[in-house]
Amino acid sequence: MLLRLPTSLSEARTCLAEGAVPVGGATLVWGVWQRDGFPEQAVSLRHVPEANVLEREALGGAVLLHRVDDRVPEVLHRAAGSVGTGAVRRTATVGGNIVGSTLRCLLPAALVLDARATVLDRDGTYETNLAEVVAKRHLLLGLRWREPAASGYHKAPADPGGPPPLVVATAAHAEDGGHRLRVAVRDGHEVVTGSAARPAGTAADPVLRALERTDLGALPPTAREVVRREVTALLDRLT
Ligand SMILES: Cc1cc2nc3c(=O)[nH]c(=O)nc-3n(C[C@H](O)[C@H](O)[C@H](O)COP(=O)(O)OP(=O)(O)OC[C@H]3O[C@@H](n4cnc5c(N)ncnc54)[C@H](O)[C@@H]3O)c2cc1C
């Protein structure tokens, strides 16, 4: 297998056009390739500057999970820190997690940040939403979002080899003098989202009731209880 390491977007496009398969840290694909056979060529974005951005409102797809620190909002920082073991986080990338893994611990965090994705295909780069990136398995160059006023991340303790642990991600963005709250819950392998406005000075209860009227209301009672707790904590921090 030829591993191609482009240093610019145009070189990366050429690699894709010539059939190279995207690879991040290979924490997932290595085993698959050993079992099913290696592709002729793979392309890594590790030397492409746009895929290595790490800023307050942007994160590149080639950034290693252990590098995701408190420059990004708490929800994303804590999500990255919760993935696997230290060895996995030192090798695995943001793009490999969001697009390539089944657990996708970073996806709920990116969803509550209302992040937009920049993807690369043979025709160039364009911006799209996370649902499309995941569904179509686009090559993820990076994520961009508006900095939230506050955010939070809860991941239930997990048994090795057991079912995916519950994840509840929350964020509040300034909106019309108040806030917009977004919640994303990974329950099993499904990710459910809901959002509600919180006009300035509103108490927690009406916000929690509004969130219950979204898809979050169909979650099992234990998950809804964690959502209530996480949202209440987030609202406390806003005041
Ligand atoms: C021991 C262990 C524990 C783990 N625990 C967790 C956990 O708690 N939570 C969790 O979420 N995950 C967990 N994982 C999965 C982990 O998230 C993935 O292994 C990792 O994120 C994949 O990243 P990678 O860069 O190594 O991807 P690779 O293995 O290189 O690629 C995986 C797939 O993603 C594609 N890909 C790679 N980069 C991109 C890109 N930029 N754009 C689009 N597609 C791309 C590849 O083509 C491939 O199909 C665990 C894995 C291991 C081995």
Image (cartoon, rainbow, N blue to C red):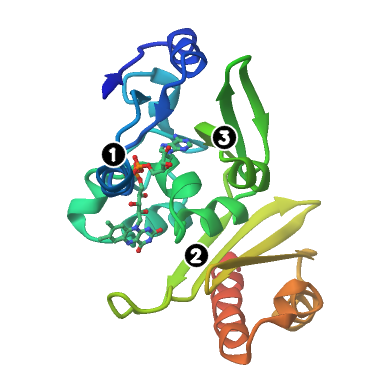
In the figure, 63 relative to 65: above or below? above
Residue 169 quadrant: bottom right
Q: Residue at x 57, y 83 (%)?
A: 223
Q: On the image, which quarter does residue 4 sit in?
A: top left
Marks 1 and 2, the one that precedes in the sequence: 1
Does residue 141 lie above or below 133 as drawn? above
Name the residue rendered at 53%, 54% in the picture.
Answer: 107
| Callout 1: CB less than 8 Å from ligand 1 | yes
Per the model, the C-alpha gap separating discs 2 and 3 is: 27 Å
Quarter of the image with the C terminus is bottom right
Q: Residues within 10 Å of mark 2 (few under 14, many from 20)?
A: many
Residue closer to the observer: 197 or 29: 29
Of the two numbered discs 2 and 3 on the same chain, state the one appearing first in sequence.
Answer: 3
- The kind of secondary structure element at disc 3 is loop
* Labels 1, 2: front one: 1
Looking at the rendered structure, which numbered label has been put on residue 25?
1
Which amino acid is tagged 1? Answer: Gly
**Kind of residue at disc 3:** His
Secondary structure at badge 1 equals loop
Toward the bottom, the furthest residue is: 221
Which is more toward the observer, 139 or 30?
A: 30
Which residue is at a point 54% across and 76% down the rendered structure image?
230
> Disc 3 designates what residue?
138
Picture quadrant where residue 154 is located = bottom left
Identify residue for label 2: 152
Residue 18 vertical placement versus 217 (above, below) = above
Q: Is residue 15 above or below residue 87?
A: above
